[in-house]
Image (cartoon, helix red, strand yellow):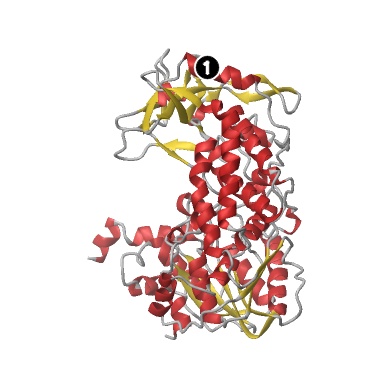
Amino acid sequence: MNPVAALYGAALPATRNGPLYGAFPYPTKISPEAIALYIAAHTKPGETVFDGFAGSGTTGLAALLCGDPPPPLRREAKRLGIRAQWGPRNAVLYELGALGAFVARVLNNPPDPMRFRSAAEDVLQSVTSDFGWLYAAEDPLGREGCVRHVVWSDILCCSTCGGRTTVWDSCVSTGPARIDSQFRCPLCNAEHPVGALDRVMQQTRDDLLGRVAESRCRTMGRVYGVTEKSTWSRDPNENDLTLLARVEHEQIPECVPTFAIPWGDLYRSGYHRGISHVHHFYTRRNLIAFGRLWESVASHQGALGDALRFWLLSYNQSHATIMTRVVAKSGQKDLVVTSAQPGVLYVSGLPVEKNVFRGLARKLNSIANAFDSVHRRTARAVVHQRSSLAVDLPDRSVDYVFTDPPFGANIPYSEVSMLNESWLGHVTNATDEAIISRSQGKGVDTYQRLLTCAFAEMNRILRPGGKATLVFHSASAKVWNALQAAYTDAGLSVEHAGVLDKKQGSFKQVTTNGAVRGDPVLLLQKQSRSANGRVGTAWEVAETLQREANDATEQTPERLYSRLVSYYLANNQNVPIDAEDYYRWHATRHSPESTRVGE
């Protein structure tokens, strides 16, 4: 197999391996280092790479890395047999989303890292000197310290007796850590699934809306803090309540957006009840803290100002909101704090309020390092916030395309991004968003039509002989077949197909029923080929692929389904079965009963 073909089945560098990982406000689908290998295999220095679904600009970063690749990237190319001509490539990126385009512009064209670091430290010092009191807390010995985070708790209403208790008191235990999914009422001893119980709601004055609004009633479950270098935790006390009363009287900054959420596919009537505007995703304390920081960076203009706003937003949605949560991990004595779940807007019954100032201080180093890895590179990555359905580039002006379009109904990107976009004051127009969405009225046919238009534009601007690499993920045969029809109708066909080993999945890839591990990756060429002859039934192909699997990783049902998808696409055939159908077949084949029958 030639090196380029081998690349389409290789285990590539994971996103977490590079200095750019920690800079992103949401997870990337594939690392810049991995994309750089594809660019090196298909282009020469000085040539132009295009991405029509640029997201947070990873393809641009990859093109920049090719100019002066780090030693591990050079070694990886050598391992794969790629005879790379390292040198600057230029990138043109189209991204429909307001947040994605903003992030891509900053990351691909960062300011001087030292100047950024100095400005960010000044912002933190200035705001914390005036508002550090927001997170003041005494440790269990009465010494002065500060909050690291607070675990808040919903209040449950027993459906048997109407009695009230908190999720923290009724479901959480430590030493070892445990969060029970069953609730036992302390008053009547009745048991219920926690998810089936009503949460206590309250009517409170909403300062930003100027009216009374409904919200979920919560109480502090546990306070975690630090005194000098010693960390501690304790139950809430009267001083905590006094501080919160002071916070209630503190004015919310004028820069805080009063943005009504255009709820769509991600809305859940349970945990989103009472959340009608963006500021409802914050505790009042964190809303004030983040607002004061946002207010402070407004004095900085141009690339430096954008970089400072990027730094704040890189922390905001994942860590500054009540979507931050705790989990009980095996072997741990206490609950572990983790970020918001990517790709959704989930609010747990035990939301976490982190100290925004401490979190952004820690985030600063990873952002500055990311800027340092890109700053002063000679290539250019031009970012346009525009739809890829109408690309403003001449015919045959691009040498190579690398893209990973939206994965059907996997993530409604414009809805996920609206919280950060509300702070930017510019939200995405989702008209041309190529997704399957009930709330947007977009089914598979609309999705296919939008992809066809985008792929046709890519074909138009691609030079003769140019290639396009497409990374995609779905558990649905209908979505795979819509993708195939789209690139075929656009005049493209598969030259090679493989399975990308990213070593890191999105939240939905990890948790969704029928999820697929390892995204099929396609090398497309500028010609349309008709379907090949008979390739066998789904189960004949599945049997063959299973026999050929040569290690434990390749023998997993998720990986084998990805191989099956790649096999059919490589042969220009429709994908015949969904992932769930394959997994049922695989489970039957490996059940004890089937083993005994075989014996």
The N terminus - image quarter = bottom left
Please identify the residue farthest to the left as the structure is shown.
Answer: 599
> What residue do we see at 71% from left, 74% from top?
456
Observer able to see residue 271: no
Q: Circle 1 — which element? A: helix
Residue 190's image quarter? top left
Residue 484's image quarter? bottom right
x and y, in percent, of residue 117 in the image = 56, 50
Compared with 403, 19 (above or below) is above
Give the residue type at disc 1: Leu
Does residue 209 appear to the left or right of 128 in the view shown? right
x and y, in percent, of residue 598 in the image = 26, 66
Observer able to see residue 424: yes
> What residue do we see at 74% from left, 59% from top?
432
- Comparing 128 with 360, the one in front is 128
- Comparing 48 with 221, the one in front is 48
Compared with 490, 518 (above or below) is above
> What residue do we see at 39% from left, 73% from top?
545
> What residue do we see at 69% from left, 43% from top?
423
x and y, in percent, of residue 462 in the image = 68, 80
- Comparing 185 with 171, the one in front is 171
Q: Residues within 10 Å of mark 1 (few under 14, many from 20)?
A: few
Does residue 489 appear to the left or right of 223 in the view shown? right
x and y, in percent, of residue 125 in the image = 56, 37
Task: Identify residue for label 1.
Answer: 241
Number of numbered callouts drawn: 1
The C terminus - image quarter = bottom left
Compared with 183, 27 (above or below) is below
